[in-house]
Image (cartoon, grey):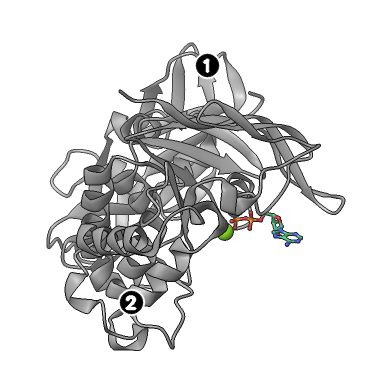
């Protein structure tokens, strides 16, 4: 059974007099990985710190397994919450071997009733879960970045917490390793079935890890949903632009049709307006060099192997000269000056009324 592990009810917080997050509402259930996605400074770490008990809310309530653990008046101590944390810098003790690093975490107040045999067994279990058994006697500097990250995870998992908080846990790792380590960690987390709240500013990482996404902007959660739903049906331009490079321009909507340089584009639920924003993901421009219309001229092609980025120029009466970027899969090359026809992939085009 999936039960609610943590619930934020109308949580607000400020650092001194400066507001950080406002009216935050969400739950994380057991067996669920929830991703908190947003740009730097939007309040992601603050939410984790509130969950962990390192910050106190100025309003609202935080509940853990059906018990209120924080409001503006009182707050349960971090060590009493039974929540595991992995931060960006793994903060392992350099002079202690891996086993001792994990045992140290088990010596906290909340585990005072455990005898040393039980603690030892919990540390051994955590090493096994994270495939680190062979490294129990190693010192942190003898391990790779990915392995150190797993130690940090083992340390967080050892007390069997109901909830794990991960703050940008992959940002210290080099890109080549990141995908493998993300994948490994996700398998471990799924096996254990603990509730997970993971913070990232990387949309691909969030989509890879999370069962549910919460997108943040300036201290508020502005959209929540399954990753694919948020990606395919962003509520506003900010969310649409957060998932990779886009082309953005102003346009108008008349009778359910948005004006584009490539003809009219049908839109739902937007009243007539001269003040709309059109966002076309780079993958949403379909280039045909043999098409009948000459919609744009190639300025440059940059081949990146798995895909190419094509820079295009065009003229649209409404705006004048425009420079746009298309992303095409595979090894593709168009000579500078090639005239191409362009169609839109409607699943990668979004129109928002600026008033709304
Ligand atoms: P994120 O993790 O999304 O980058 P944070 O939660 O760290 O964002 O920060 C949210 C806001 O609170 C930012 O404007 C940041 O500058 C501010 N802030 C973070 N920590 C502190 C602090 N200890 N004192 C004062 N302001 C802080
Ligand atoms: Mg942060």
Relative vertical location of residue 68 with respect to residue 14 in this rendering, above or below: above
Q: In this rendering, would 121 be left or right of 23?
A: left
Give whichever of 315, 159 is nearer the camera: 159
Estimate how packed mark 1 is, as few (under 14), some (14 to 19) or many (20 or more) residues with alpha carbons within 10 Å. Answer: some
**Residue visible at 24% across and 39% down?**
293
**Residue visible at 25% across and 64% down?**
124
**In which quadrant of the rendered image does the N terminus lie?**
top left
Give whichever of 3, 48 is nearer the camera: 3
Q: Which residue is mark 2?
A: 98
Q: Is residue 92 visible?
A: yes
Q: Position of residue 43 (x, y in %)?
A: 63, 49
Give whichever of 351, 147 is nearer the camera: 147
Q: Which residue is mark 1?
A: 270
Disc 1 on helix, strand or loop?
loop
- Between marks 1 and 2 in the image, the one whose residue lies nearer the viewer: 2
Label whose residue precedes the other's in the sequence (1 or 2): 2
Disc 2 on helix, strand or loop?
helix
**In which quadrant of the rendered image does the C terminus lie?**
top right
Relative vertical location of residue 252 with respect to residue 75 in this rendering, above or below: above
Disc 2 CB within 8 Å of nearest ligand 2 atom: no
Q: Position of residue 190 (x, y in %)?
A: 24, 43
């Amino acid at each position: 059974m999936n039960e609610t592990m943590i619930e934020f009810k109308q949580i607000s917080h400020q650092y001194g007099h400066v507001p950080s997050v406002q009216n935050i509402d969400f739950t994380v259930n057991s067996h669920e990985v929830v991703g908190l996605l947003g740009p730097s400074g939007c309040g992601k770490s603050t939410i984790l710190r509130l969950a962990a008990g390192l910050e106190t809310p100025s309003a609202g309530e935080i509940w853990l397994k059906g018990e209120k653990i924080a409001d503006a008046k009182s707050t349960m101590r971090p060590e009493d919450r039974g929540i595991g944390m992995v931060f960006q810098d793994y903060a392992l003790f350099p002079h202690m071997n891996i086993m001792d690093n994990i045992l140290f975490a088990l010596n906290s107040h909340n585990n005072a009733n455990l005898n040393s045999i039980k603690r030892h067994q919990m540390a051994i279990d955590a090493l096994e879960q994270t495939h680190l058994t062979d490294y129990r006697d190693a010192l942190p500097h003898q391990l790779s970045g990915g392995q150190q990250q797993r130690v940090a995870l083992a340390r967080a998992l050892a007390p069997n917490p109901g909830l794990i908080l991960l703050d940008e846990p992959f940002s210290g790792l080099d890109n080549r390793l990141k995908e493998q380590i993300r994948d490994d960690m996700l398998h471990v987390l799924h096996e254990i079935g603990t509730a997970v709240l993971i913070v990232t500013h990387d949309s691909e990482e969030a989509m890879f890890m999370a069962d549910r996404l919460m997108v943040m902007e300036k201290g508020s959660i502005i959209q929540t949903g399954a990753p694919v739903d948020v990606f395919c049906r962003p509520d506003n331009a900010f969310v649409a632009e957060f998932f990779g490079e886009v082309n953005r321009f102003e346009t108008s909507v008349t009778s359910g049709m948005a004006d584009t340089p490539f003809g009219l584009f049908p839109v739902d639920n937007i009243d007539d307006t001269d003040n709309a924003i059109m966002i076309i993901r780079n993958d949403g421009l379909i280039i045909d060099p043999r098409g009948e219309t000459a919609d744009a001229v190639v300025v440059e092609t940059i081949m990146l192997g798995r895909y190419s980025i094509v820079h295009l120029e065009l003229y649209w009466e409404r705006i004048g000269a425009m420079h746009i970027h298309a992303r095409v899969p595979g090894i593709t090359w168009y000579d500078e000056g090639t005239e191409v026809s362009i169609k839109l992939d409607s699943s990668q085009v979004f129109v928002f009324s600026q008033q709304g």
